[in-house]
Image (spheres, rainbow, N blue to C red):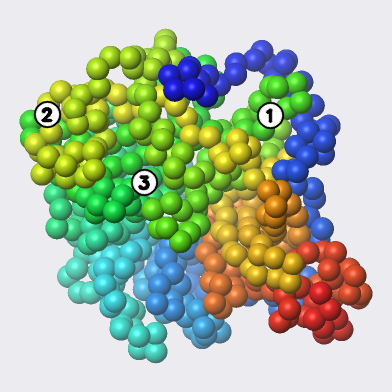
Amino acid sequence: MKEGEKFRYPVAPAKLRQASVLLLLLAQGSLLEASSLQLPRFSSTFKEVLKAKSVKEFIFKFETRDFRLLHMDQGWIYAGLRDYLVSFSQSKMNREPLIIKWPASPEKEKTCRMKVIKGQENLCFNFVRVIQPLNRTHLLVCGTGAFSPICAIANRGRDPQDFVFHLVRNSQTSGLGSCSYSPHYESMATFIDGNLYTGVYMNFIGSDPAIFRTTGHLPTLRSDSYNNLWLNAPEFLKAFKISDSLNRNDDKLYFFFREKAIQGLPEPTVLALVGRVCLNDVGGQYLLTNQWTTFLKARLVCFVTEKDGRKTFFNKLQDVFIHPVDDKRDPLIYGIFTTPSDQLQGSAICVYSMADIRAAFNGSFTDKISSTNTGEPYTGDVPTPRPGSCPGGVSAPNFHSSKAFPSKMIEFIRTHPLMFNPVYPLQRRPLFVRTGPNSTFTTGVMDVVKAADGSYKVFHLGTAHGTVQKVAVLESNGTTEAVNLEEVAVFRTPAPVKTMMISSNQENLFVASDTGLSQLKLQRCPPYKTCALCCRVRDPYCISPLKSCSPKVKRCC
C-alpha cells in the first residue's frame, strides 16, 4: 500500500461471507499451502500424559480458582489467584509452594455485594492481577479488592533458599490506576525503570479505560479521559519497553490491545492495535495536563489471500510475545489472532518487524473519523515537532520537556491519535494458519531449539478447549515449513488456557486456566519404534544430536 492510499477492510454480504468461509474450509490444504497447519500428528489425553509423568498437576489444600501465571523471576514462578498469591521454585517443583492468603476486607466484600448486579456476587473477592518486582527482595502486588483495587508489597527474600514469602506489614495502599475493579476487565502491567505502567479500567462500571503510569519517580499520567478516539472499550494484552534510537530519550512503551471499532463503521467490529507513549513524557503544560502528550496507535492486520484475490482476515488479537534479536531495538513481534466468532474457527500467527511498526507511526495520520466516516488520511500541515515525538529525542531535540510542546501539537495529538496506514506482517501473510474445529488459540510462547537439521522455532500454543499444541517452524533458504507436532490435554478439568510461561533452562512449560495450574515437560518424546519414524516426526526436542528419540532409538537422527 502506498503512502496515503486508503485502506479498508472488505465488506461483503452475509451470503458471500459464508461462501468464502466454506471455500476456506474445503480448500484449506491448497488455499493456504505453505502456511497451513494440518491436524496434530500426535494427541494425548490428560490421563496419558499424567501416566507418562510428563505433566504435573498442582493441587492445593485450599479452595480457589482463577489461576493466572503472572511473573517468572530469580528462580521462582509467581501465580496470582483469587484471594491468594503462590510462589513455586522452578528447580524444585516437588517442594511445597509458598502461599500468601490475601482476601479483600469483610467491609469491602459486603459493600461489593450490595453494589454488583445480582448473580455476580462471585466477583466480590480479591483477584490478583499484578505481580511485578520492585527490587531483588520485594514484589509489588495488586488485586481487584472486591471492586476496590488494592496494592501491597510482598517480601520474597533475597535467595530462593530463603523460602520467605509474606506481605509487608502496613504496606497496603489503594490500587486505583494499578489494577482494574473487575477481574473481567482485561488488564496489563509492566514495571520499567521504577515506574508501573498499566492498562486498566479506572471506574466501577468499566467505562473509563486508561493507559496509566504510577508508583515511581515520574509524574502520574493517564490517557485522555472518555475519549473513544484514543481507547474505545479496549482489552489490554501486553506491554514492552523498546528503544527507538541510541538516544535514551526515545525509549518508548509499546502496548498491544484490541478494541471495538467506532460504532457505525463497517467491518470489522474489532481492531487489533499497537500503541505507544514516550517514557519521558510528563504531560502538557496547559492542554493534556497529567495526560500523555505522545499517545499514538496503529492497526495491525493479519490475513490470508484466497486464490481469487479476496482476503480472509483474522481480526481478534489474542496474545503477543516478542523474540529478541541481536539489536534490542528491533525485536520480532508475534501476534496470535483468531477469526470472528460468527465465522469459521481459525487462528493465525502473524509476525511484525519493528521497522514496519515505526514506519506506520511515521506515516500519515487518520483524519475525521466518526460514526459515519471511516476516516481519511490527514492532508493538512502537521505540527512541529511531529506529534508523537519524545522530548529531547531525535525528532524533538530542542524540547527539554513535554510541557514545552506547543499547544497546536498537543491539540493535534488529542484529536488525531490513530495512524492511517496499518502495519502488515512480514511477507504480508501469516507465519502459519490453523482452521477447523479446536483451532482457537488463546495464548502462546516460543522456544528456539537447535536440532541436527537446523534451528527450529517451537511454538507452544494454548487453546480454548484446554490443550497445548506444539508447532515447529523451520525457516531455510527463504522457505518456511510449519509442522503441528502434537496436542496435549493439560488440565484434569478442561478450560481455556489463560496464560503460559516457559522455562527453557528447566525445560518446563507452565500453563494456567480458571480451573487449574499444570507443569508440562518440554521433552515429551513418544516411544518411536524406528529411527526413520523418529526423524520423520521432526520434533526438535527429540532429534537433537545430544538427545535420544526414545530409550530404544539413541542419537539416530
Check disc 1 and report its element: helix, strand or loop. Answer: strand
Q: Which residue is mark 3?
A: 254
What's the distance in space between the residues labelled 1 and 3, CA to CA? 28 Å
In the picture shown, does residue 180 fall above or below 153?
Answer: above
Q: Residues within 10 Å of mark 3 (few under 14, many from 20)?
A: some
Look at label 1 and name its amino acid. Thr
Left or right: 97, with 104 as reference point: right
Pick out the residue farthest to the bottom. Answer: 161
Check disc 3 and report its element: helix, strand or loop. Answer: strand
What's the distance in space between the residues labelled 1 and 2, CA to CA? 44 Å
The x, y position of residue 525, in whole percent, is 77, 73
Q: Residues within 10 Å of mark 1 (few under 14, many from 20)?
A: some
The x, y position of residue 422, in whole percent, is 47, 30
Report the disc number at residue 305. Answer: 1
Left or right: 433, with 223 as reference point: right
The mark nearer the N terminus, 1 or 3, is: 3
Look at label 2 and name its amino acid. Pro
